[in-house]
Image (cartoon, helix red, strand yellow):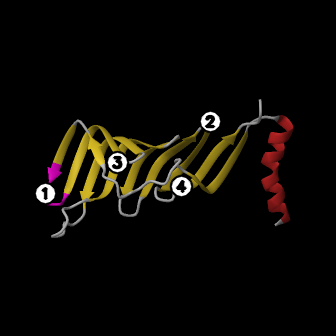
């Protein structure tokens, strides 16, 4: 325990003494994402170059400069598969989840994230981004293999080789 505490102190010591950037590596990091809590019950607006709908499996594929807007959240990707939930007598089918691929950008307030893929479960209000995730928050940047965003809570968790660079004062 004592050795572990000393090892965690080393990057901070290097930063304090040299004023040079310190690289911090971790396996899991929790942080805030966006400036507000996202209302996941708001309508989802989708804009794209083309649309293909399948009535048999209840899906739609949007391609070409796809932009999805829900409240303050913006998601952009080359291709998005939309999966609709079951319709009831009182309510028509609504979007259950979105699967964005081909290079995805997610923006909420001043925070932005990029990844190879993003899966948005609308009912849970959760976006899971996979593959070379890059999160920017102001001048700070973090990378990881996976990031899970809780839109309702305004939080994110990064997992799998989390890396950030902390810069000293100029």
- Real-space Cα separation, disc 3 to disc 1, in angstroms: 20 Å
Find numbered disc 3 in the image and state the secondary structure of the residue it sits on: strand
Query: Can you say which quadrant of the picture contains the N terminus?
Result: bottom right
Image label count: 4
Q: Nearer the viewer, residue 66 or 71?
A: 71
- Mark 2 residue crowding within 10 angstroms, few (<14) / some (14–19) / many (20+): few
Q: Earlier in the sequence, mark 1 or mark 2?
A: 1
- The reply to whether the C-beta atoms of the residues labelled 2 and 4 are less than 8 Å apart is no
Estimate the spatial distance between the alpha carbons at disc 4 and disc 1, rounded to whole Å.
Answer: 35 Å
Residue depth check, mark 4 versus mark 3: number of the one nearer the observer = 4
Quadrant in the picture for residue 123? bottom left
In the picture of the structure, the residue carrying the numbered disc 2 is: 139
Dot 2 or dot 4, earlier in sequence: 2
Q: Are marks 1 and 2 in contact (CB under 8 Å)?
A: no
Among numbered discs 4 and 1, the one appearing first in the sequence: 1
- Residue 55: which disc? 1
Where is residue 83? Give x, y as percent.
26, 57
Q: Residues within 10 Å of mark 1 (few under 14, many from 20)?
A: few
Q: Which residue lies furthest to the bottom in this view?
A: 89
> Mark 3 or mark 1: which comes first in sequence?
1
Q: In this view, does 169 lie above or below 55?
A: above
Position in image of residue 14 (x %, y %): 82, 42
């Amino acid at each position: 325990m004592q050795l572990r505490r000393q090892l965690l102190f080393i990057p901070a010591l290097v930063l304090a003494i040299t004023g040079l950037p310190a690289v911090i590596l971790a396996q899991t990091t929790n942080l805030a994402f966006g400036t507000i809590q996202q209302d996941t019950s708001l309508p989802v607006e989708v804009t794209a170059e083309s649309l293909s709908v399948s009535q048999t499996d209840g899906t739609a594929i949007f391609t070409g400069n796809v932009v999805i807007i829900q409240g303050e959240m913006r998601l952009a990707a080359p291709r998005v598969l939309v999966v609709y939930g079951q319709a009831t007598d009182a309510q028509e089918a609504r979007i259950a989840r979105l699967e964005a691929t081909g290079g995805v950008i997610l923006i909420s307030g001043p925070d932005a994230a990029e990844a190879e893929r993003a899966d948005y479960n609308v009912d849970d209000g959760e976006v899971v981004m996979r593959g070379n995730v890059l999160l920017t928050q102001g001048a700070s940047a973090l990378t990881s293999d996976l990031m899970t965003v809780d839109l309702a809570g305004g939080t994110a968790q990064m997992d799998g080789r989390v890396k950030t660079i902390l810069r000293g004062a100029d």
